[in-house]
Image (spheres, rainbow, N blue to C red):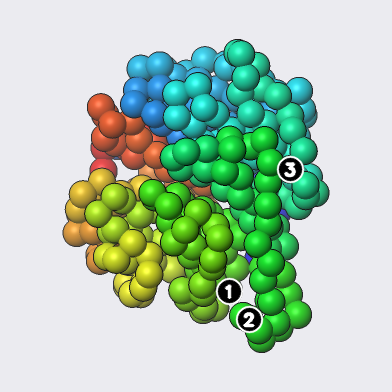
Amino acid sequence: MKKFSILVLVSLLLPAIAQAAPDGSSLRYQGTPHDALFDIAFDGSHGLAVGGGGTVLESTDGGLSWTAGARPDTELALLGVAFQGQRRFLVSQSGKMFRYESGRWVEFDSGTDARLFQVALGGNGLVVAVGGFGAILVSRDDGRTWSSPEFDWMEILDDYVEPHLYAVDVTGDRITVAGEFGLILQSPDRGAKWSVVRRGVESIFDFTIDTKGEGLAVGQDGLVLGTSDGGRSWTKHAEPGETNLLGIWRSGSRAFAAGIRGAYASHDGGKTWKPVTRSDIETGWYQAVASSVARDKPMLVGHRGRILEMDE
């Protein structure tokens, strides 16, 4: 399933949506009807959001306000962002990657032309990006050199396919990757060795794992999975609906999942969910969810370049 292609089509078909937010949500940023934001990340109170046409938005107050940030030299869609202080990376279409250096974005050779969906940072120079057709890129020197693990996809999936990999997390030395066919891969040692943790049917579009090893994954047709051991095993939770869930956020027992024409809130760690009633959520799409530490509220990015903060 091609998540990015679906979102492009949906963004072109969606109707105009009212600006009002009377339901406990706050519209923090509004783009044009043709804008789209695909990812959001926070480091303390500092936030970055990225999207179509090389868009970069920046916040210094925990997401309350957003302004145009430094842009890379590209008109392609920026699909993923990760940063820790001045250590910042962007991933894009056609394998393009950018690193922030001396106040500007510098493009470097990723070694692939596959569309890259997400990027994550670890300690001691570890950077991991994932994307289309089984792309996993690992750097241990902050993006100066890259390597790609080799997989026998026929043995793993029993089919001649290279799965799109949509999401990645780095916690300590552990790297976790998820994508099509319910696939979850994990490396305990900064990408030296890999194992297959899970295979399924529905695509996994996003997941989160905290430092205690507890986490949630979401995906196609309302798929929700939970882990309590750092992603080494996953349990299927009740599906909140048939919405394709594209982004997941979790803070303690609170969780928020957003996707195409639907979003859901949970107050028991993702075991049960309540649908969020808001006109543009029910008719639009939101792809990524994050929050600043100080505000601790889910902040969504998606169609029309919107950044929406929820009180759920």
Observer able to see residue 156: yes
Per the model, the C-alpha gap separating discs 1 and 3 is 25 Å
Please indicate whether residue 65 sits to the left or right of residue 70 in the image: left
Answer few, some or many: residues within 10 Å of disc 1's Cα (few below 14, many 20 plus, some between 14 and 19): some
Q: Which residue is drawn at 67% across and 71% down?
A: 151
User: Of the residues tagged 1 and 2, which is closer to the observer?
Assistant: 2
**Residue at mark 2:** 157
In the picture, measured across the screen, residue 200 lies left or right of residue 9, that is: left
Q: Earlier in the sequence, mark 1 or mark 2?
A: 2
Q: Quadrant of residue 28?
A: top left
Q: Indicate the amino acid at tag 3.
A: Ser
Which image quadrant: the C terminus? top left
Residue 117: % across, % down:
62, 48
Q: What element carries label 1?
A: helix
Q: In which quarter of the image is the N terminus?
A: bottom right
In contact (CB < 8 Å): disc 1 and disc 3:
no
Determine crowd level at label 3: few under 14, some 14-19, many 20+ residues with C-alpha closer than 10 A.
many
Mark nearer the N terminus (1 vs 3): 3
Which residue in the protein does label 1 denote?
Answer: 181
Query: Residue flagged by tag 2: what amino acid is it?
Result: Leu
Circle 1: residue type: Phe
- Tell me if mark 2 has few (under 14), some (14-19) or many (20+) residues whose alpha carbon lies within 10 angstroms of its own: some
Q: Distance between the residues labelled 1 and 2?
A: 8 Å
Q: Position of residue 42 (x, y in %)?
A: 41, 31
Answer yes or no: do the residues labelled 1 and 2 have beta carbons within 8 Å?
yes
Per the rendering, the mark at residue 110 is: 3
In the figure, 96 relative to 47: above or below?
Answer: below
Locate residue 3, reporting x and y percent: 63, 56
Q: Which of 156 and 253 is in front in this view?
A: 156
Of tags 3 and 2, the one toward the viewer is 3
